[in-house]
Amino acid sequence: MEKKEWIESGKCAIGIEFGSTRIKTVLTAADGSVIAQGSHTWESHLIDGIWTYGMDEILDGLQDSYSDMAKEVESKFDLPLKKVSAIGISAMMHGYLPFDAQGNLLTGFRTWQNTMTGQAAAELSELLSFNIPQRWSIAHLYQAHLNGEAHVKDIAFLTTLAGFIHWKLTGEKVLGIGDASGMFPIDSVTRDYDGKMLELFNEKMQGAGYPWTLTDILPKVLCAGDAAGTLTDEGAKLLDPSGNLEAGVLLCPPEGDAGTGMTATNSVAVRTGNVSAGTSVFAMVVLEKMTEKVHEEIDMVTTPVGDPVAMVHCNNCTSEINAWAGFLKGFLEEAGAAADMNMVYRAIFEGALKGAPDCGGLMGCNYIAGEPVTGFAQGRPLVLRKPDAEFSFVNFVRMQLMSAVATLKLGMDILTEEEKVPIDKMFGHGGYFKTPVTGQKIMAAALGAPVSVMKTAGEGGSWGIAVLALYAAFRQGILSYDGLAKDATLPLYLEDVIMKGQEGSTIEPDAEDVKGFAAFMESYKQMLKVEKLATEEF
């Protein structure tokens, strides 16, 4: 069908994802091809020591991003967007959004960036014999309890950013299993919160006198393909104040950016993985079995259908690269040269390929925020060099790109070397891979595995959640595909419908690059002692 016919017939899906710097909306046809896009730029704020986004910013950004997409539809096809087959909501995982019985937010939104729950994370990890990272919702809840925060007794519902938006649109207090796995541990057999761990937590809290148990306040867990409610009249007005969008649309389970990244890169099958590199960086590998040991550097989450996934999540990635790009643009402007950010980024990423594999003795730390993987509550970006280092532009920018993924390598080495987890292929997506070859080549050296980038990877999480919305519409009988059984699994659906014929490129690890990265990492580990002192004294 032509795109206009897709729109008129409503055989489309909308995907909306709340990223750390952009809220992006896409409209896709039933085959996953993108019809229109819209976006809204925003950023988190550090208020009273807490990273947050305001509630007005969240809802205004939702409307602006959707409106931007709807305007593109009207401009291209001379049609208002009235009906679709399904909608999906995704967002940054984790964090803390507690509500009272009247639906009032009890605190400001505490995002994944915060590293303020160290005591809670440690106590819960010991209690549950399971690694609970600082950014997980349960860590934020327990830390608020430990701090004696008055609002805890009034909590009636605790959710994530994706779960909140979904609730506002549908009235349903549900969550996709992947996003739920960043709130509380999941049992991949029952496809629900781990029952034994729930009991342990509830027993721990018995003496606190709260009128709730954890079971009462967590969202219901759903898997990809499940129906997660429909767009209410109020939800339609919230999303599209113009009144064009019709209510009654199916919504798929709201998912986190990890699940949408897996979907967008077709890495939901066992022994595949993906790495998302942008403001933060995380790598995920779908496991054949659970890890042998508990590692505080590795989070156990799930795919959108509930299979176990080992995840290494680092708070810092490209922000320091972006800062230096802005610095270099400013230099060019002062020098009277024509400069735009695309040109600067191209010079950085293409120049890095010409740098020495070990960066010629240059070293840096990209920690703008804290980094739990290495035990840092806060960060101080650093650039270091020895007097005899080869201080050149190409070595400097290569160092920045390698520093951006060095902490990720520390966590992934535990998976591959200690746990002997096999990885057949990693799929890359995010801004780090936007310039062809460079990001893949450096990441392949860091991970010691082939890194592929599909054409679809550039669409990101908003496209990934749109695909999950299409899958839900398919499983619920709203959409059908010739030759595809009605009970087709998500991996089969992705292979046979969405990724069929998709182009991509794969880069194998280069032996010299791998050797150079290993040498860089030996110095990097020593540099962290300097970073520690910097956070204490500067």
Image (cartoon, grey):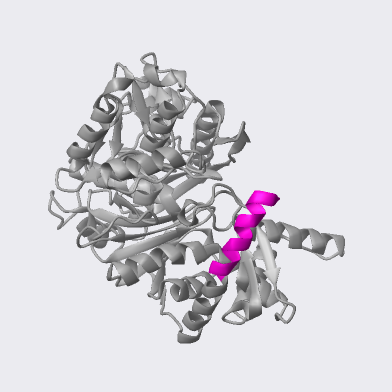
Q: How many marks?
A: 0
x 51%, y 51%: residue: 315
Residue toward you, 487 or 269: 269
Magenta stretch: includes residue 222: no
Query: Left or right: 408 with respect to 258?
Result: right
Measured as percent of width and height from the top left, residue 430 is found at 49, 58
**Visible residue check, residue 251:** no
Q: Magenta stretch: give its range.
A: 524-538
Residue 279 horizontal side relative to residue 290, left or right:
right
Give how far across and how far down residue 534 sits, in percent: 66, 55
Magenta stretch holds residue 531: yes
**Residue located farthest toward the bottom when viewing the structure as drawn:** 512
Helix, strand or loop for the magenta stretch, by majority: helix
Would you place residue 310 above or below residue 198 in this image? below
Picture quarter containing residue 321? Answer: bottom right
Give the percent coordinates (x, y) of residue 535: 64, 51
Left or right of residue 361, residue 147 in this image: left
Residue toward you, 123 or 43: 123
Measured from the top left, where is residue 373 in percent x and y? 46, 55
Query: Is residue 111 visible in this depiction of the protein?
Result: yes
Q: Residue at x 51, y 64 (%)?
A: 405
Query: Residue drawn at (33%, 21%), measured in percent from left and top?
Result: 208
Q: Nearer the viewer, residue 505 or 416?
A: 416
**Vertical relation: 319 (above or below) 60:** below
